[in-house]
Image (cartoon, rainbow, N blue to C red):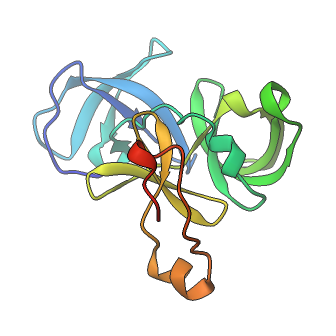
Amino acid sequence: GEKMERWWPGTRLEYTREGDPGSWFSVFVLADDGGATVQVKYCDFADEKTVERAQLREPRPSAPREWYKHLCRGDTCELLHDNGYYESTVRAVSGSGARKKIKVVYAAANGDITHEKSFRQFRPVFVREGGVWACTLGGKRWHILDGGLCRAPPLAAEASAGACERRVDPNCPQGESY
């Protein structure tokens, strides 16, 4: 897990199953005595189980408005499939507006699996950065603010690769520029 903290019963987390790397399922904490394991119950199944604390993480936020407009081939995102999210690599983006589709591939225990679904079935891969959620789309770093994307200050790798561009971002509060 991301933090070695004790979780209260009823806390919602995400759980990755052994043998299914990059998969994340919503669970509720049933019991946590602060040890190496935590008792959880799936949100979408009746199953209860005891899992390693390292297999748990803080739940991710909803996908920000219009995030998919920045998605490019080769980006990593999470596909909602069979009641869980699966970390996937984008192979293609097609269509526009409400008809936009994303084709991805993800590694499963029985080999790579390819899906093509509506952008609504995906979310970015989020990380905590300076107290806010962040993601990388189209080779650029974004912060999630007020449900939308805001261009994050450039990472050193972006700056050296020339990926930085100074512009006013309409999704940022007060039209901040980066």
Residue 76 vs 30, above or below: the answer is below
Which residue occupies 51% across, 45% down? 149
Using the image as rendered, state which of residue 175 and residue 126 is in the foreground: 175
Q: Left or right of 152: which side holds 20?
A: right
Which residue occupies 85% across, 35% down? 96
Return the x and y of residue 37 as percentages of the image width and height: 24, 40
Q: Left or right of 140: which side holds 115?
A: right
Using the image as rendered, state which of residue 37 and residue 55 is in the foreground: 55
Can residue 16 be seen at all in this image of the molecule?
yes
Residue lying at the far right in this picture: please name it. Answer: 95
Return the x and y of residue 168 as percentages of the image width and height: 53, 57
Residue lying at the far top in this picture: please name it. Answer: 46
Which residue occupies 11% across, 40% down? 34
Return the x and y of residue 156 as percentages of the image width and height: 45, 82
Residue lying at the far bottom in this picture: please name it. Answer: 160
Residue 128 vs 123, above or below: the answer is below
Can residue 17 be seen at all in this image of the molecule?
no
Using the image as rendered, state which of residue 28 and residue 36 is in the foreground: 28
Q: How many marks?
A: 0
Using the image as rendered, state which of residue 81 and residue 122 is in the foreground: 122
Return the x and y of residue 4 as percentages of the image width and height: 17, 50
Residue 27 vs 52, above or below: the answer is above
Residue 73 vs 43, above or below: the answer is below
